[in-house]
Image (cartoon, helix red, strand yellow):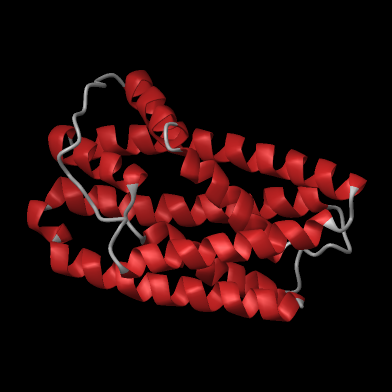
Amino acid sequence: MPDLPILVSFIVAAFVVVIVPGVTVSALVSTSLARGMAAGFWMEAGVQVGRLTMVLIVALALEAVTSVVSAAFDIIKYAGAAYLVWLGWGYITSRHGLSTDRPVSARTPLQQMVAGFLVLWSNPKALIFFGAFLPQFVNPAYPAWPQVIGLGLIEMGAGLITDGVYIYLAAKARTALGDDRINLVNRIAGVILIGAAVWLAVQHH
């Protein structure tokens, strides 16, 4: 695993990233508003399965690439840092806003889980994000895949906590997620994400 300061930075960054509403949060909120808290958490279970599959893909791919070409690790890290800066700017300019008017068709727990899995995988940016975000905190002196899996599990835990808060608030009060609060979260998270990406790139250099 990474050194303690890097690990602490990752945990902070993980919560910053997942707390910003996107496609997944929008679907969870919509489901919770329409069908209640239980339906929202069943959908979250499917989302978590989707996250795990993406983490495994990133772990295997990163290990395969860096084992063949060691210089590829630097390329992946800098490209990932650039993507995180672009993503943070998108948060600041509110390109990733919350929407609660998405249609919800799943009803049974299994259908809700499948819906959550498909929501995550229907957005290719999610896989790109995992591929850009997790390698930033991997120590190249050690095998990549166990580090990616460990970091991915931490990211999944952060997602479960923040998604759970959104599900709870959406199920309990429609007015709890006002546009002003969401916009403020977007802008703060964007600034932090850009700063973290730049800091990581400089540290690696």
Residue 109 occupies quadrant: top left
The residue positioned 28% from the left and 63% from the top of the image is 94
Give the residue displayed 48% in from the left and 71% down from the top.
193
Residue 89, quarter of the rendered image = bottom left
Residue 121 is left or right of residue 111, and the answer is: right
User: Which residue sits at x=15%, y=39%?
Assistant: 101
| Residue at x 75% of width, y 75% of height | 204
Residue 166 in picture, x, y percent from top left: 27, 53
Q: How many marks on residues?
A: 0
6 vs 107, left or right, is right
**14 shown above or below 23:** below
Pick the front one: 166 or 18: 18
Place of residue 174 in the rendered image (x, y in percent of width and height, measured from the top left): 9, 51
Indicate the position of residue 171 as horizontal and vertical percent values: 17, 45
In the picture provided, is 97 more to the left or to the right than 133? left
Q: Is residue 189 left or right of residue 124?
A: left
| Residue 96 in the image, given as x and y percentages of width and height | 31, 55
* 75 lies above or below 109: below
Task: Tell me the quarter of the image containing the N terminus.
Answer: bottom right
User: Picture quarter containing residue 53?
Assistant: top right
The C terminus is located in which quarter? bottom right
